[in-house]
Amino acid sequence: MNQSKKLTDGALLTAIYVILLLVSIFVPVFSIVAFFLLPIPFTVYTYRYHWQAAVLMIIAATILSTLFFTVVAIPMTLLASFGGLMIGIAMKDGATPYETLARGAVGFIAGIVALFLFTQFLLGVDFVGEIDAVLEESLESSQQFVQSVGIEQSAEEIEVVESIVFGLKDLAPVGIVIMAVILSFVSQWATYKLLNRIEQTTFKFPPFRDLTFPIVMVWIYLLAMILMFIDLDPHSTLYLAVQNVYVLVGLLIALQGYSLLFYYNYHKGRSIGIPIIAVIVTLIFPFQFIYIVRMFGIIDIGFSLRERVKKVKK
């Protein structure tokens, strides 16, 4: 009976995945929503029957998607299945929501890398060349707009803008990590809602105000900051690694600062609208406020600022 149910669930969830893939490719209005839902069938099946059975489902989904949509569907299946598999394994193991999020992000990173390699070497898509073309087109459009409104730019100013724009390519690893975290969060949240409804489970994310990172994050950030002041070769692997670590850890520490803001607001019994407005303002004017938020994150991680907030309340 259990084996029959396992096969039935596998066939049903594989069919659901193929339908979602169909919608994500051919229905523009719902394509983005369907894309974020693609990992859910793999997550649910892995959670129910563990990874050994899920691997067989992944193989079946890959074969079916290839038959229906040709080899173009393989990269999307790899991306969805890797992330969904990791989230499902973490849920099966009883991992905490944030640990599940981290494992899912690792799975999606592996899926993104697999997608890149597949399209680069088997489909002949030159991602680097495409990105360069998009950046050059954006620069030309912005320069034409500036000239149309009567603003003159010197050669030095144009060179600085070009160096900044093309320097964004160096932060591609950070972009991949952020994309993977977003995919993992949306897929995990949607899976929680689905399982809570159909299986009466109680999966949920803890409040954002309780988000904390270990103190090692501060030491990594300070080390990366020190290395940033060293005159490294901008084209070296070490420089690119340090730059990406500095930006990524800085973003995580800023999240800690935002979390502290919500934590302080909660313990003071104030309206949640206050921290939400503060977050919106800092995102609109990042260069003016993000360093302040990051500073609060560093203080919170390094000096247990939340404990002081609790003591003040008592």
Image (cartoon, rainbow, N blue to C red):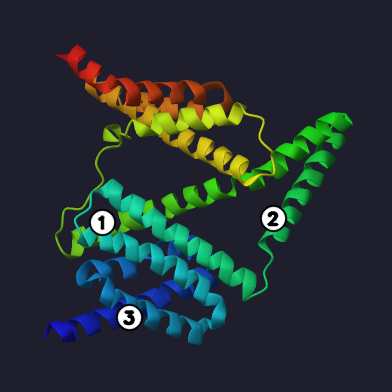
- Horizontal arrangement in the rendering, residue 63 relative to residue 138 (left or right): left
Horizontal and vertical percent position of residue 99: 29, 49
- Horizontal arrangement in the rendering, residue 155 relative to residue 134 (left or right): right
What's the residue at 22%, 22% (across, down)?
267
Residue where numbered disc 2 is placed: 131
Q: Earlier in the sequence, mark 1 or mark 2?
A: 2
The crowding category of the residue bearing disc 1, from other C-alpha atoms within 10 Å (few below 14, some 14 to 19, many at least 20), is many
Is mark 3 in CB contact (under 8 Å) with mark 2? no
Residue where numbered disc 1 is placed: 192
| Residue 285 in sight in this render | no
| Residue 166 in sight in this render | yes
Q: CA distance from mark 3 to mark 1?
A: 23 Å
Where residue 274 sits, quadrant-wise, is top left
Under mark 3, the amino acid is Leu
Instruction: Identify the image quadrant of the N terminus.
Output: bottom left
- Horizontal arrangement in the rendering, residue 70 relative to residue 47 (left or right): right
Front-lying residue, 208 or 94: 94
Q: CA distance from mark 3 to mark 2?
A: 36 Å
Q: Which mark is residue 56?
A: 3
Q: Is residue 71 above or below residue 80?
A: below
Q: Secondary structure at mark 3?
A: helix
- In front: label 3 or label 1: 3
Q: Secondary structure at mark 1?
A: helix
Q: Earlier in the sequence, mark 3 or mark 1?
A: 3
Q: Is residue 22 above or below residue 294?
A: below
Instruction: Identify the image quadrant of the C terminus.
Output: top left
- In front: label 1 or label 2: 2
- Horizontal arrangement in the rendering, residue 122 relative to residue 249 (left or right): right
Q: CA distance from mark 1 to mark 2?
A: 36 Å
The crowding category of the residue bearing disc 3, from other C-alpha atoms within 10 Å (few below 14, some 14 to 19, many at least 20), is few
